Each structure stands twice: as C-alpha cells, then as structure tokens.
C-alpha cells in the first residue's frame, strides 16, 4: 500500500492511500506540480512496506524502486555518476532549481529532526530490550 500525504496552506494534512505504485506515483506527480505552483506546502510519498524489517539484497531494492540502477563495479558507477552530473550541469538552471525545491521540500528542519531521531536511536539502543536481544544474538 502506498500513501500520498499533502499539506495545503491553512489546512490539515490530507492522506490518500493507493494499492498500486503507479496510481500513487501519478497522484504524487500531480502534487509536485501543485507544490511548484505554491498551492501546496508539502507533499510526500510513503510506501507502507517501508516498515518491513527483513533484510533484502540489492536486486530486491532495485525491483522495488529503492535503487534506480545497480552497477557491477565502482568504475561503472563512477562513470554513470559523472555522466549524470554532466547532464545536470548542461540543464536549464531554472528547471534544476525547481527540481531541487521539490526534492528538498519538507526538509527545512532536518538539523533538529536528525538530532531528535539520533536521541531516540540512542535511547533505544541502550534499552534493556536491545541489550537482551544483543546478548541473545551473541550467544548463538
């Protein structure tokens, strides 16, 4: 299940759920256009499967859209990154600026958010539950 969350000025968050990734992406793209035009304050796309705690390999991540592409070697990856950087450098600066605004929307308070989440992680890792789980893992 996929969730698209929207925030219009002076309104509460509006969440819509979709069974298909394609439908959710279509709604999210429409929301991004509204964000550029100033009709939205925030938009986000969330895959409810993201809370799946099982380990998955790189191929699984690519199939599920977490990675857009896999490379066999570091050299191949570096070449692809260089090609993408050159393409972006040759792009319309206004379009690139608007894309950056879309991609980074909702991250204005990341410094605070990262500190808060680091504190949460620190508290959780020191909890008795975590210590017990680590001890059990070491005993195997």
Image (cartoon, rainbow, N blue to C red):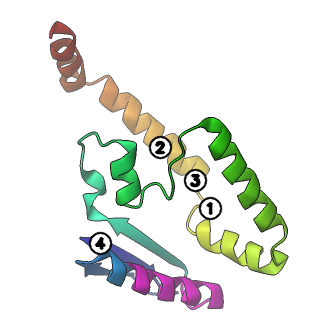
Residue named by callout 1: 108
The numbered mark, 4 or 1, whose residue comes first in the sequence reads 4
Kindly report which numbered mark, 3 or 2, lies closer to the viewer in this rendering.
3
- Residue beneath label 2, please? 116
Which of the 4 image quadrants contains residue 98? bottom right
Label 4 or label 1, whichever lies nearer to me, is 4
Per the model, the C-alpha gap separating discs 4 and 1 is 24 Å
Horizontal side of 89 relative to 130 (left or right) equals right
> Which of the two labelled residues, at mark 3 and mark 2, occupies the earlier sequence position?
3
Q: What residue sits right under mark 3 in the picture? A: 110
Give coordinates of residue 13: x percent, y percent.
38, 79
Q: Which residues are magenta?
A: 25-40
Dominant secondary structure of the residues highlighted in magenta in the image: helix
Residue placed under numbered mark 4 in the picture? 2
* Spot occupied by residue 1 in the image (x, y as percentages of width and height): 23, 70
Of marks 3 and 4, which one's residue comes earlier in the chain? Answer: 4
Q: Which residue is drawn at the image coordinates 41% and 55% (left, top)?
A: 62
- Looking at the picture, does residue 4 appear above or below residue 62? below
Residue 104, picture quadrant: bottom right
For the point 51% across and 55% down, which residue is it? Answer: 69
Left or right: where 62 falls relative to 92? left
Query: 9 or 45, which lies in front?
Result: 45
The answer for how far apart the CA atoms under marks 4 and 2 are is 26 Å
Q: CA distance from mark 3 to mark 4?
A: 23 Å
| SS category of the residue bearing label 4 | strand
Q: Please say if the residues under marks 3 and 2 sit with CB atoms less than 8 Å apart.
A: no
CB under 8 Å between discs 3 and 1: yes
Name the mark nearer the viewer: 4 or 2: 4
The vertical placement of 100 against 64, above or below, is below
């Amino acid at each position: 299940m996929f969730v698209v969350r929207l925030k219009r000025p002076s309104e509460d968050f509006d969440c819509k759920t979709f069974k298909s990734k394609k439908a959710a992406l279509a709604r999210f793209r429409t929301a991004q256009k509204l964000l550029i035009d100033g009709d939205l304050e925030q938009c986000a796309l969330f895959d409810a499967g993201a809370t799946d705690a099982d380990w998955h390999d790189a191929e699984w991540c690519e199939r599920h859209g977490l990675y857009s592409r896999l490379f066999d070697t570091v050299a191949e990856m570096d070449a692809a990154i260089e090609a993408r950087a050159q393409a972006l450098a040759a792009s319309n600066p206004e379009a690139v600026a608007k894309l950056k605004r879309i991609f980074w929307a909702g991250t204005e308070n990341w410094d605070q958010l990262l500190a808060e989440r680091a504190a949460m992680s620190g508290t959780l890792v020191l909890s008795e539950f975590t210590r017990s789980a680590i001890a059990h893992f070491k005993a195997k």
